[in-house]
């Protein structure tokens, strides 16, 4: 009997033994990027704490079947949620004894849901505004655009300075109009790891009578600890007048399993429009603080166990290890001719670009991948060059000494290989084709030529040509191409 999973259907004619099913999962997992070991600089957050995975998994299993739909039926989950919200509020300038003593919040499935709910609360607080709008910096997370799209809120994007990578507070203030319901900023921005001028932006929003949300999904759990370690972190939390809500992901630098985020509001009145309630049907009255109704207690219990186990002192130690790793990686980048930092690191991100036209950044990414280092390429945008993003976690600390030589070797190999030269017809296509002109046949042929031949083929080992094509295309065409490419991958193969 073939022991390999087919990938076509999860439903066999007859049930399989548990051992066989687990073997299939392990075979599938072997294709993934490594989630531990300090060589994956995106998507996952590894503290390298022995036993933490096992603790979180046990806590997850203990509450996996608890349903967050009705907090009165499952008081254990309510208690853990409130404890997580209290911990986040205390870390971010709220709670008893602070200038924001009434901070309340909700546990969500992740940063995107937190941002969608922040926009929903701001929109629904002003039913009299028929065409509500959101002001966000160009460096703001794409989830803000997703929220605007889902909720039919207009999006006013403020450019970022190409030198500072931050929005200008005056330009942000000028973008606020009578239909603006929310102004957003980042602490830090994901792409480059810089902290926006939260104080000035929040003041402008408050002056206009508009809410201000700080997206601290990425840095909210670690910036307070970095400040305690002496890093000059500017004010960004509820200590800043005018900040009305903050999001922070616990599955990032609180090192909880996916997916747990917390959305905080300065007071209960600000949170009230976040809820959805409906009683006009014959079933139970639905009252939801989040987008999902039924929610497994597993992620919440796992996050609760993680926070309780690591404690304040543990997070301080992890932040110190991360700070040192960031410094070491930044120094490694400075040591390679033809590379430069996009910004001096001030959080947990190292972001760099190429200054030498003979050093193709996308080829460099492939060469790093071949050496076991998985980074995140970022395409050029509005005058900002293509760059490489490194999300740095505590697990990276023990691998920093290896990264410098690997980066130098990868850069040497990338120079030897030379820059990607797109066929002229592809470059012309990328510059002239409109998203509406894409046909399934055109996309299929293009995907096959680039090595994206469908779900069975998976992704190619080297992505420089694909990234170069996407980089040559305007954002709208990039979006359509990637939707079609991913659509080819996300199909069962029978």
Image: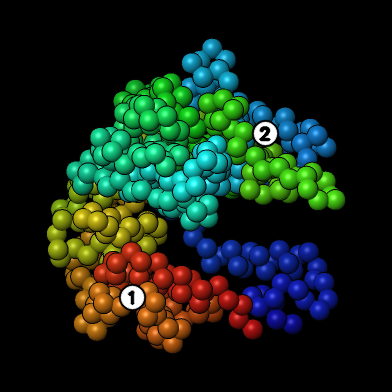
Residue 103 percent across, percent down from the top left:
56, 24
Closest to the observer: 184 or 364?
Answer: 184
Crowding near the residue tagged with mark 1, few <14, some 14–19, many ≥20 C-alpha atoms within 10 Å: some
Secondary element type, mark 1: loop
Q: Is residue 352 above or below residue 123?
A: below
Q: Name the residue beneath numbered marker 1.
A: 434
Q: Is residue 470 above or below residue 341?
A: below
Residue 168 percent across, percent down from the top left:
25, 38
Q: Residue at x 84, y 50 (%)?
A: 283
Q: Is residue 226 above or below residue 371?
A: above
Q: Residue at x 65, y 28 (%)?
A: 83
Q: Name the residue beneath numbered marker 2.
A: 81
Task: Tell me the quarter of the image containing the N terminus.
Answer: bottom right
Asked whether residue 123 appears in the rendered view, the answer is yes
Judged from this view, the residue extending furthest toward the right is: 282
Q: How is the image coloured?
A: rainbow
Q: Is residue 34 left or right of residue 390?
A: right
Secondary element type, mark 2: helix
Task: Tell me the quarter of the image containing the C terminus.
Answer: bottom right
* For marks 1 and 2 on the same chain, the one whose residue lies earlier in the sequence: 2
Crowding near the residue tagged with mark 2, few <14, some 14–19, many ≥20 C-alpha atoms within 10 Å: many
Marks 1, 2: nearer the viewer? 1
Between the residue at mark 1 and the residue at mark 2, the CA separation in whole angstroms equals 47 Å
Residue 305 percent across, percent down from the top left:
66, 35
Closest to the observer: 154 or 157?
Answer: 154
Asked whether residue 309 appears in the rendered view, the answer is no
| Total tally of numbered discs in the picture | 2
Residue 113 percent across, percent down from the top left:
56, 47
Q: Residue at x 21, y 76 (%)?
A: 421
């Amino acid at each position: 009997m073939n022991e390999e999973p087919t990938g076509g259907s999860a439903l066999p004619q007859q049930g399989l033994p548990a051992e066989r099913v687990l073997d299939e999962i392990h075979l599938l997992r072997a294709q993934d990027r490594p989630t531990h070991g300090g060589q994956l600089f995106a998507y996952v957050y590894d503290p390298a704490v022995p036993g933490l995975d096992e603790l979180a998994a046990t806590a997850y299993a203990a509450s996996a079947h608890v349903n967050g739909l009705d907090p009165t039926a499952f008081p254990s989950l309510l208690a853990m949620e409130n404890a997580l919200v209290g911990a986040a509020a205390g870390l971010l300038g709220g709670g008893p004894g602070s200038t924001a003593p009434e901070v309340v919040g909700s546990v969500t499935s992740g940063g995107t849901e937190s941002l969608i709910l922040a926009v929903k609360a701001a929109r629904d607080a002003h039913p009299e505004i028929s065409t509500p709008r959101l002001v966000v910096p160009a460096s703001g997370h794409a989830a803000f655009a997703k929220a605007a799209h889902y909720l039919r809120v207009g999006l006013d994007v403020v450019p970022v300075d190409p030198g500072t990578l931050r929005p200008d507070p005056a330009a942000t203030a000028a973008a606020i109009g009578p239909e603006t319901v929310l102004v957003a900023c980042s602490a830090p921005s994901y792409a480059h790891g810089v902290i926006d001028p939260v104080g000035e932006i929040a003041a402008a929003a408050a002056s206009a009578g508009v809410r201000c949300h700080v997206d601290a999904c990425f840095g909210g759990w670690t910036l307070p600890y970095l400040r305690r370690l002496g890093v000059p972190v500017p004010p960004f939390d509820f200590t800043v007048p005018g900040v009305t809500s903050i999001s922070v992901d616990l599955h990032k630098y609180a090192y909880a399993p996916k997916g747990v985020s917390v959305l905080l509001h300065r007071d209960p009145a600000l949170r009230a429009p976040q809820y959805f309630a409906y009683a006009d049907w014959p079933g139970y009255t639905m009252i939801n603080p989040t987008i999902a109704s039924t929610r497994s207690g597993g992620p919440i219990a796992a996050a609760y166990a993680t926070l309780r186990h690591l404690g304040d002192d543990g997070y301080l130690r992890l932040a110190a290890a991360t700070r040192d790793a960031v410094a070491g990686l930044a120094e490694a980048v400075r040591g390679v001719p033809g590379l430069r930092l996009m910004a001096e690191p001030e959080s947990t991100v190292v972001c760099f670009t190429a200054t030498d036209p003979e050093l193709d950044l996308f080829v460099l990414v492939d060469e790093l991948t071949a050496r076991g280092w998985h980074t995140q390429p970022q395409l050029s945008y509005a005058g900002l060059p293509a760059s490489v993003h490194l999300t740095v976690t505590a697990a990276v600390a023990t691998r920093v000494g290896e990264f410098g030589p690997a980066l130098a070797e990868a850069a040497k190999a990338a120079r030897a290989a030379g820059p990607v030269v797109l066929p002229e017809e592809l470059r012309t296509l990328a510059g002239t084709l409109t998203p509406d002109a894409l046909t399934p046949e055109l996309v299929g042929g293009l995907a096959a030529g680039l090595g994206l031949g469908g779900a069975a083929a998976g992704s190619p080992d080297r992505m420089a040509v694909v990234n170069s094509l996407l980089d040559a295309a305007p954002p709208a065409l990039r979006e359509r191409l990637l939707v079609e490419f991913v659509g080819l991958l996300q199909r069962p193969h029978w």
